[in-house]
Image: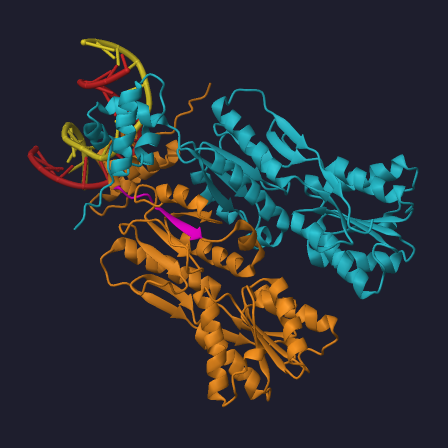
Chain colours: A orange, B cyan, C red, D yellow
Amino acid sequence: MTDIRQPTLEEVARLAGVGRGTASRVVNGSDHVSQRTREAVEQAVRELGYVPNQAARSLKTRRTDTVALVIAEDEERVFAEPFFAGLVRGISRAVDETSRRLVLSMVPDESHLSRLGQFLTPQHVDGVMVVSLHDALSLPQGPDLPVVYVGRPNDPRACFVDVDNLGGARRAVDHIIERGRRRVACITGPQDMASGRDRLAGYREALDAAGLPFDADLVEAGDFSETSGARGAAVLLDRCPDLDAIFAANDVMALGALRELTRRGVDVPQDVALVGFDGSAAAAASTPALTTVHQPLAELGATLVDVLARRIEDPDAEPTSVILSTELRMGESS
Amino acid sequence: MTDIRQPTLEEVARLAGVGRGTASRVVNGSDHVSQRTREAVEQAVRELGYVPNQAARSLKTRRTDTVALVIAEDEERVFAEPFFAGLVRGISRAVDETSRRLVLSMVPDESHLSRLGQFLTPQHVDGVMVVSLHDALSLPQGPDLPVVYVGRPNDPRACFVDVDNLGGARRAVDHIIERGRRRVACITGPQDMASGRDRLAGYREALDAAGLPFDADLVEAGDFSETSGARGAAVLLDRCPDLDAIFAANDVMALGALRELTRRGVDVPQDVALVGFDGSAAAAASTPALTTVHQPLAELGATLVDVLARRIEDPDAEPTSVILSTELRMGESS
DNA sequence: TTGTACGCGTTATCAA
DNA sequence: TTGATAACGCGTACAA
């Protein structure tokens, strides 16, 4: 039987011929240690393959070096929508750059919420990032845990990072109108999400600015799913055969709409200009007929992790909120 | 300032009027405790909102109550392929049933491997589930950590849980042949994955059993991506215009093939029967023209977690390997 | 059945 | 700059 136990700091210290305290200082990068002993300890660490015991460290420091990413959405949906993929990817990368670990948990419904409550305590995580897109759901974490939201939450005092949904939608529709389209339809996102509401608001703003009337017949509710995009397009085409553009509140619905348009033999984007919010570069690339509002998901992740880190550092600081600007990416034929 | 500290077991014991040891026994569900004191302690736990300190517990018990799921694949791919979504979902659900937590990490390339090595120690996790589909990649974890693989690994002594790729492919192609098809083409998966090889082997087996010749012209290599499925179908159709069926090694490629077939105006499944391996029920449901080999991903997750739990319990036990049977699900028109 | 006391590996405080 | 030592919160062996 080989020795199963991991080497302890005590053993490292002994091998290096120093006290445990000194070894600890070296491992944690303290300044007050001579070059000679530092090297001796580092050598011992390498030799023994020492890895700090996180449990003991946490017990003492009351930090866990772990942050949680809570997505208030069903796994199905998280995996289906490119937005989440890009988001998780961006956050994951950003956390990798730090010394912290990331734990991801998806919360499909209320029943999983109580389990999570046990976990969202300072004992388990140093902070939490919440993607609580729907208004209703509120997380059961105490006020003693730093939280940063993805997307603007209801609580105006909360920290959050978001992309410029309103501005992005506004510019997208501006762009359509500049190209001479007058009957611009809209397939909205869910109205119980800020992102859904903001993108609709951007659509209205652009209409107003151009002096175009708001026509309720040109607006159809969607839920960010491809099916709802296809259905939305079908309804809109039936109701307003004269429409010459569709703004979909996300790319998945735009894809659904595109499919419906193609099925009907509509020339996209000659007859109908199609614009959506994209969740990933891939979506835009794969459908050249589609112009998209590009969301900087990598940047979003980085910013999010940064804001959370700051907040963990100093929980009493003034709450920060960041809104990242979006960028319009043309399909090849616009 | 409110008191930020979480209540300790000591405080629970004091409130319940018992010793700390007794409180611990109640929390951990020991038998040797009277009904009266148990209730008193439980009451105190509720009153104080006590949550056990995992760090302290780990330090003492040398267990972490955490298992890792390592997916040796890029995030992009993990999120794109429904197989992974179903897998993660199944495992996630299964772990939720236990008292353990799950941490998920995706390993796109070698560079992330060293970081992981630090984490894959008994100090951080009790065991690990590895989805190492490609042959090349081997994880840097010591022999002292229980490991269960998803899919048959190279090491014959390793624990694993897999779906019956060979049998599933075999039955799928059997099914096609029984319907009278004689020129059955195949779009394979990557041949550096056991699943890719096994499904191709199943295809050959079915051919042999039916006395049909193996024709290399009818086989085209794919990589499980939709694009490769479409390209595979295109190549096959050009090379063998007389083919009357296509067996794709996964559903994503089958979808790609379907798109190409539709584009060419081929009648599916009248002229060409199409069969794939599905990663999720949704894929099969959305394309009635497609017959799929259904993989029991929920069951796979449950089994996997169960096998790992056993192995954590008794690391010296004989390695177990489980192969779950698949089920052929007909499209509506077969 | 219950309480006491020790030690898990670490960081932090305090003298030296 | 360094080494001893006291917690951190918990499980458990042992004594009662």
Check the image and report above or below for A12 versus A39: above
Name the image quarter holding residue D4.
top left
Q: Residue at x 52, y 87 (%)?
A: A213
Please indicate, yes or no, whether residue B224 appears anywhere in the rendered image: no
- Relative to B324, A305 lies left or right: left
Image position, residue D1 (x, y; %): 18, 41
Residue bounds of the magenta highlight:
A62-71
B289 or A214, which is in the foreground?
A: A214
The answer to whether residue B259 shows anywhere in this view is: yes
Percent x, y of residue B236: 84, 56
Q: Nearer the viewer, residue A169 or D13?
A: A169
Label total for image: 0
The quadrant holding residue B256 is: bottom right
Compared with B174, A277 (above or below) is: below
Q: Is residue A124 left or right of residue D1?
A: right
Residue depicted at 26% across the width and 50% down the height: A144
* Position of B27 relative to B195 (above/below): above
Residue at 88% x, 37% y is B208
Q: Quadrant of residue A244?
A: bottom right
Q: Report if residue A64 lies within the magenta region.
A: yes
Q: Position of residue A113 (x, y in %)?
A: 41, 46
Label the magenta part by its dominant secondary structure. Answer: strand
Residue B51 percent location from the top left of the image: 31, 36
Residue D4, relative to residue A119: is it above or below? above
Asked if residue A311 is among those painted magenta in the image, a careful observer would answer no
Left or right, residue A200 beside residue B271: left
